[in-house]
Image (tube, rainbow, N blue to C red):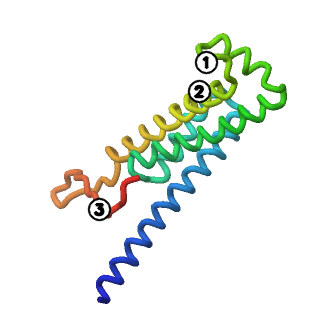
Amino acid sequence: MIKKVFTASCSTILSNYLLMKFIVSFFLTVLLSFAGTLFFPWWIIAVAAFAVAALIHMRPLASFIAGFLALFVLWGAQASYLDAKNQHLLATKMASVLPLGGSYIALILFTCFIGGLVAGMAALTASFLRRTTGNKVVGKNGHETRKRVMLKERHF
C-alpha cells in the first residue's frame, strides 16, 4: 500500500516537473524571440529556440512542440495585431496573390506555421545535439565514456 502511494506520488512529481520545464521553455522561447526580433533579423527566432532547447533539456519531441507552439502563438499574435491595424487590407491582397483564395486568416495561419516550423526544427536540432554530446565521464582507464541516467519520462 505504501509502495503504491509512493510510486504514484513520484510519478505525479515527475510529470509536474516535465510540465514545468515545458511551460518555462515555451515562455522563454516567446520572450527571447520577441526581444530578438526587435533588434535582429527574423531568423533570430531559430537562434532563440536553439538556445532555449539547449539550456532546458527535454525529449526531442517535447522540444520541437515547445518551440513550434511558442512561435506559432507569437507570430500569430503579432500578425493578427498588425493585420487588424490596417483593416486586413494588405493581408487580403497578399492572400489573393498567393493560392489562399483571398483569405487573410489563411495567410496568418500560414505565417504562424512557417515561424513555428523554423523554431521547432531549431529546438529539435538543439535537443539532438545535446543528446549526442551530453554527460561525458572519464572512466577508470582514462578513456572518455558516456554515462546516461535515464529517468522514466513521459513522452509528449
Kind of residue at disc 3: Val
Q: Is residue 80 left or right of residue 12?
A: right
- CB contact under 8 Å: marks 2 and 1: yes
Q: Identify the residue at image location x=43%, y=65%.
A: 15
Q: Identify the residue at image location x=64%, y=39%.
A: 33
In primary-sequence order, the first of circles 3 and 2 is 2
Please name the residue that numbered disc 2 is placed on: 110
Please name the residue that numbered disc 1 is placed on: 100
How many numbered markers are drawn? 3
Kind of residue at disc 2: Phe
- Residue 58 horizontal/vertical position (percent): 42, 53
Q: Nearer the viewer, residue 90 or 50?
A: 90
Marks 3, 2: nearer the viewer: 2
- Crowding around mark 2 (Cα neighbors within 10 Å: few <14, some 14 to 19, many 20+) is some
- CB contact under 8 Å: marks 3 and 1: no
- Residue 121 horizontal/vertical position (percent): 46, 35
